């Protein structure tokens, strides 16, 4: 191949390649924009839940130095005990874990003793009931899933131990990238708070099935089986905080965040020390490297 | 391993051992006196980072296995009791889970570095192929590891991926049942995946040893792509490469710790905090992020391939998708021969450089598409992006070798370094003598 011919072929090829890329990019953009418009217009296809994104709240446990607010967790436990616990279990928690909320041994013992567990067999080979101890796991409201369904119109109230981690609606592009830098990990508690305060009347265009309750923040549909669980001023907290729906929702969300990640405080403290150490170590290595490489052009 | 050894045992014990089991000599020749090109940049540190990640995953994994119960009714709780009740348990578990993701981040940078600097070209084809084998083993290990916590995504991911095998004509269902140990994902699946998840990392270790061995036979490439020609081109591994790798490793570790301690769930999926339930299918089943590009390729093939104008179907959409997905990995094995250019480094290949970046952006985009549901606009985008993936390897790579006019390359690594540094004196270059690299 002569140099001239080669150059000509190269030019042809370059143009060809440029054209292909241009066509691909242009057509994808065209399809993208037209279909977005089309979807908005016809309002068909599979709807994506939740219909509305959770509202971001301020939490004491967000950020690099975040830690749980014990008073808030105690209030959250009250909401759980008086309200949620009639349907939802907390299988992964033990009563002894409540010491993290600032309760002493006796208080935990008394709290546990309100429930009964089946133990045994005893020396006679018989099972027996006894009050729960602090080493027992939280006693749930139902013996099994079937009983739970039977008493809730066929709907199974989920276990709440990991709820604050298991419910995290998609953040979408490009928010999920910014989240790395803002250290946003409170999607779960935000969701729970928003769901609890988000019950409203369904718009006329929406038909809500019998026994379901409209809530645009629900993660897997436009309505859920749980009726609005919180009642305004149902009770007053022991610390005098007014028990508004908003306050209760906030407290139970924080409590569930703790239940799902009880080692959060420790994790963040440990992370700070580890990263501080690594930063200093990296600095020392950097200057050592500079010194070692100073006699080599590279 | 290459060149003649410069190891001189001084102590009596050293001499005794050297005549019988010269392991100190092996270490000295491989990691102390081993000559490396003087112009390696930081992208060349990821090989070392990957070795550390492999060891870190094995150590954390072995300890987690002490607390894990491979039983369908207990696996989920055992992972969470480890996080709650075992000292350092949550750090350990996060380190292992985040570690898998960081392992893949490092391996992707390592692979793209190879593609950019043409590290797979003769005489390093086997080095590259061993690398692809390691990558495949890593994918198998990671997939099976993700099944073990027995959450919803574990379960349904296993369901979807083992289903691929049923697409194989004639023996597909038998193969699938053999993998699962039953007709569906269940306790038997969990048990065999646990066993294999423990086994595969040691197989990876074996292939890594071969990978490093081939590397030490051929020597490393470098950003100029010009082979080492004289002893001025190289510097001894220790202290130069050792300190450089150590610094890069610690920086990498800082990023990893940010995720481990502050955002441990960011790289995972929320649904895996729901225990596996065979009666409830998640709204969107998505694999771990590092498989997403291949998941997009799988779903891009939603049409049957048959003889035109007849109803005869040769390859149905399911088999087509599986073939395309495995083809996307298989094509990597042929890269050393698909690339017809004599020039290694993209620095001297103006057109390849452009196509490399288009390919890289397309690969990331393919990953994003993998996380989208297979509906609406996403399907044609998946198709276009998949097409470009294969087009790059099968059409662009071979053609560029013929059409592209490379830029003039430096005569040697030392020349390139001198040109870059402008005024660096020859004395400075000669000041650091190391053994020249010998092939073979």
Image: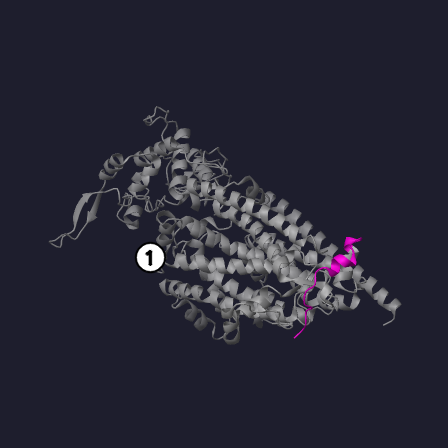
Specify the quadrant of the image occupied by residue A3: bottom right
Q: Left or right? Give the position of A189 relative to A42.
A: left
> Does the magenta segment cover residue B426?
yes
How many discs mark residues in the rendered view?
Answer: 1
Q: Which residue is mark 1?
A: B73
Decide which of B291, A285 is in the foreground and name it. A285
* Dominant secondary structure, magenta: loop
Chain of the residue under label 1:
B
Q: Left or right? Give the position of A2 relative to B197.
A: right
Q: Left or right? Give the position of B353 relative to B366.
A: right
Decide which of A198, B98 is in the foreground and name it. B98
Decide which of A237, B81 is in the foreground and name it. B81
**Mark 1 nearby-residue class (10 Å; few <14, some 14–19, many ≥20):** some
> Does the magenta segment cover residue A260?
no
Decide which of A199, A298 is in the foreground and name it. A298
Looking at the image, can residue B101 be seen?
yes
- Residue A42, position as x, y percentages in the image: 59, 45
> Is A4 situated above or below A82?
below
- Residue A134, position as x, y percentages in the image: 26, 42
Split into 4 quadrants, where in the image is the C terminus of chain A? bottom right
Which stretch is magenta? Answer: B420-440
Secondary structure of the residue carrying numbered label 1: loop
Q: Residue at position x 52%, y 63% from top?
A: B138
Q: Residue at position x 51%, y 39% from top?
A: A53
- Residue B339, position as x, y percentages in the image: 70, 68
Q: Residue at position x 72%, y 52% from top?
A: A26
Q: Left or right? Give the position of B228 relative to A140.
A: right
Specify the quadrant of the image occupied by residue B379: bottom right
Looking at the image, can residue B292 be seen?
no
Split into 4 quadrants, where in the image is the N terminus of chain A? bottom right
- Residue B250, position as x, y percentages in the image: 56, 51
């Amino acid at each position: 191949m002569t140099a001239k011919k080669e150059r000509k072929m190269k030019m042809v090829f370059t143009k060809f390649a440029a054209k292909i890329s241009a066509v691909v990019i242009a057509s994808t953009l065209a399809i993208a924009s037209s279909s977005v418009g089309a979807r908005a217009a016809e309002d068909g296809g599979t709807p994506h839940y939740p219909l509305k994104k959770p509202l971001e709240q301020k939490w004491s446990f967000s950020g690099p130095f975040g830690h749980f607010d014990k008073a808030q967790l105690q209030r959250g436990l009250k909401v759980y005990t008086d309200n949620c616990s009639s349907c939802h279990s907390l299988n992964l928690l033990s009563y002894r874990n409540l010491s993290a909320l600032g309760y002493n041994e006796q208080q935990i013992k008394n709290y546990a003793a309100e429930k009964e567990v089946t133990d045994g067999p005893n020396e006679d080979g018989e099972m027996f009931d006894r009050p729960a101890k602090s080493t027992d796991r939280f006693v749930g409201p139902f013996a099994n899933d079937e009983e739970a369904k039977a008493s809730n119109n066929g709907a199974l109230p989920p276990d709440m131990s990991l709820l604050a981690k298991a419910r995290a609606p998609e953040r979408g592009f490009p928010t999920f990238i910014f989240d790395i830098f803002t250290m946003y990990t409170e999607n779960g508690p935000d969701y729970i708070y928003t769901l609890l305060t988000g019950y409203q009347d369904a718009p006329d265009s929406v038909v809500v099935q019998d026994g379901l309750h409209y809530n645009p923040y629900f993660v897997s549909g436009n309505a859920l089986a749980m009726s609005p669980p919180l009642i305004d001023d149902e009770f007053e907290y022991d610390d005098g905080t007014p028990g508004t729906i908003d306050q209760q929702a906030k407290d139970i969300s924080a409590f569930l965040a703790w239940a799902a990640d009880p080692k959060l405080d420790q994790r963040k403290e440990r992370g700070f020390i580890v990263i501080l150490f690594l930063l200093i170590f990296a600095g020392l290595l950097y200057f050592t490297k500079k010194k070692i490489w100073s006699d080599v052009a590279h | 391993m290459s060149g003649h050894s410069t190891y001189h045992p001084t102590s009596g014990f050293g001499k005794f051992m050297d005549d019988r089991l010269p392991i100190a000599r092996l270490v000295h020749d491989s990691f102390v006196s081993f000559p490396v090109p003087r112009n390696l940049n930081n992208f060349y540190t990821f090989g070392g980072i990957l070795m550390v990640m492999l060891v870190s995953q094995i150590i954390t994994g072995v300890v987690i296995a002490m607390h894990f119960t491979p039983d369908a009714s207990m696996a989920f709780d055992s992972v969470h009791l480890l996080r709650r009740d075992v000292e350092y348990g949550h750090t350990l578990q996060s380190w292992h889970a985040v570690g898998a993701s960081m392992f893949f981040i490092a391996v992707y940078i390592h692979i793209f570095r190879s593609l950019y600097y043409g590290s797979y070209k003769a005489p390093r084809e086997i080095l590259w192929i061993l690398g692809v084998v390691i990558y495949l083993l890593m994918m198998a290990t990671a997939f099976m590891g993700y099944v073990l916590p027995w959450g919803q995504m574990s379960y349904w991911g296993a369901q979807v991926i083992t289903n691929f095998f049923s697409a194989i004509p004639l023996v597909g269902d038998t193969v699938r049942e053999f993998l699962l140990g039953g007709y569906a994902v269940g306790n038997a699946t969990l048990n065999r995946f646990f066993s294999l998840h423990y086994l595969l990392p040691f197989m990876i270790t074996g292939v890594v040893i071969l990978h490093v061995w081939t590397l030490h036979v051929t020597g490393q490439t470098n950003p100029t792509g010009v082979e080492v020609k004289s002893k001025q081109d190289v510097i001894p591994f220790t202290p130069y490469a050792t300190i450089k790798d150590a610094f890069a490793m610690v920086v990498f570790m800082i990023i990893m710790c940010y995720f481990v301690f502050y955002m441990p769930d960011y790289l995972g999926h929320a649904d895996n905090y729901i225990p596996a339930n065979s009666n409830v299918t998640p709204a969107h089943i998505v694999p771990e992020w590092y498989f997403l590009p291949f998941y997009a390729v799988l779903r891009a093939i939603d049409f049957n391939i048959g003889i035109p104008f007849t109803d005869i179907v040769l390859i149905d959409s399911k088999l087509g998708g599986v073939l395309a997905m495995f083809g996307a990995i298989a094509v990597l094995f042929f890269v050393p021969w698909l690339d017809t250019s004599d020039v290694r480094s993209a620095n001297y290949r103006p057109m390849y450089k452009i196509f490399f970046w288009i390919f890289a952006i397309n690969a990331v985009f393919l990953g994003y598409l993998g996380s989208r549901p297979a509906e609406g606009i996403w399907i044609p985008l998946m198709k276009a992006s998949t097409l470009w993936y294969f087009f790059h390897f099968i059409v662009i790579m071979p053609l560029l070798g013929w059409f592209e006019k490379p830029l003039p390359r430096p005569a040697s690594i030392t020349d390139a370094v001198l040109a870059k540094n402008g005024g660096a004196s020859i004395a400075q270059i000669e000041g650091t003598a190391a053994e020249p690299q010998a092939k073979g």
